[in-house]
Image: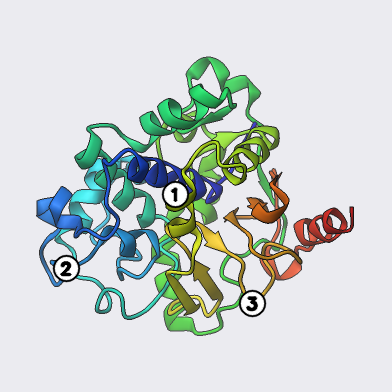
Amino acid sequence: MAVMFSGTKGLVATVAAILVDQGKLEVRKKVANYWPEFATAGKENVTVSQLLNHTTGLVYVDPEPEGEWAPLDNTANAAVLAAQEPLWEPGSKVAYHAITYGYLMNEVFVRATGKSAGQLIRELIAEPLGLDIHLGLPEELEGRVAEIFRSDNYAISTFLTDPERRKIVDRMYGSTLMSEKLQANFGEFHRGELAAGGGIGTADAMANLYSQIAAGKVVSDEALADATRTWSEGTDAINDRPLRFGLGYEVADPIGTYGPVEPAFGHSGAGGGLHGTWPTHKLGFSFLINEMLAEDQDTRVKDLLNVLELH
């Protein structure tokens, strides 16, 4: 198993779609319907769909809770975000909410169901489907987690050249990716429930999940069609990268993240991981990495998807 970084966001998107099917979540409702404290500082009309499609304008936590492992405290970070003013009018711009997506959606899940993202991933996905996927790893499984290492020239946000927005990126990711010691290699991180990037699993499990999603065995056709249509797209207002989002899922974009087949959806992860499906082929795939390469140098998953399409 390995940490899948933002591949976790696809699990959160799947939980959201299942909760829609169960009548426990309505993505067109205001966040404040579930989380009243969120209705401040210009966020009164923000909808759950805007949290899922990365248009809210809360790309970092300000001020950050203190402590080395504070990024793992979903509740504390969500409380700060509830009071925080967004960087732009929600819905007017799209920008990847690399870490805050998890705090925001975890809190919505807790308010709507009384259960955290980690609990819901276990109860709605991992256990019923028999999949080796975890958000909050049981301590007895620690020995199965692969160590992750970064290439010597690993970098994030490789589309970005503006130095002022680079400062925002540094705030967005904080210590989660670029600290001297990679937090993802520590048991504290594995046991935590960082809902934007702390999921742990195997490539087999993730490919199996997306195959079952594509086959209609996890989410209803109606909910899945809604979750995988384009809800936001454009050039990332912070990172200058082309984006296209459904409801928490990435969908096929102009730079071919999901290979030569459309439609496609899923979610990528820092360092080169990718987990998703070509739904017309009823085919799920997962490329799970423990060697992190910069996006502008990494062709591994695109090469593999090109070969897959030929076969």
Q: Is residue 127 visible?
A: yes
Count of numbered badges drawn on the protein: 3
Q: Residues within 10 Å of mark 3 (few under 14, many from 20)?
A: few
Q: Quick one: label 2 or label 1, which is nearer the N terminus?
A: 1
The residue that appears at 49% across and 26% down in the rendered structure is 137
Q: Position of residue 299 (x, y in %)?
A: 79, 63
Rendered-image quadrant of the N terminus: top right
Disc 3 and disc 1 in contact, CB within 8 angstroms: no
Q: Which residue is mark 1?
A: 13
Q: Name the residue that disc number 3 marks.
A: 254
On screen, residue 167 versus residue 298, left or right, reads left
Secondary structure under tag 2 reads: loop
Circle 2: residue type? Asn
Tag 2 residue: 45
C-alpha gap between disc 3 and disc 1: 21 Å
Query: Which of 90/311 is in front?
Result: 311
The amino acid type of the residue labelled 3 equals: Pro
Vertical order, 75 against 151 (above or below) = above
144 sits left or right of 181 in the view = right
The residue under the point 30% across, 68% down is 56
Q: Nearer the viewer, residue 276 or 21?
A: 21
Give x and y (percent) for residue 119: 37, 29
Q: Earlier in the sequence, mark 3 or mark 2?
A: 2
Q: Could you say which is closer to the camera, residue 284 or residue 117?
A: 284
- Across and down, in percent, residue 175 comes to 45, 52
* In contact (CB < 8 Å): disc 2 and disc 1: no
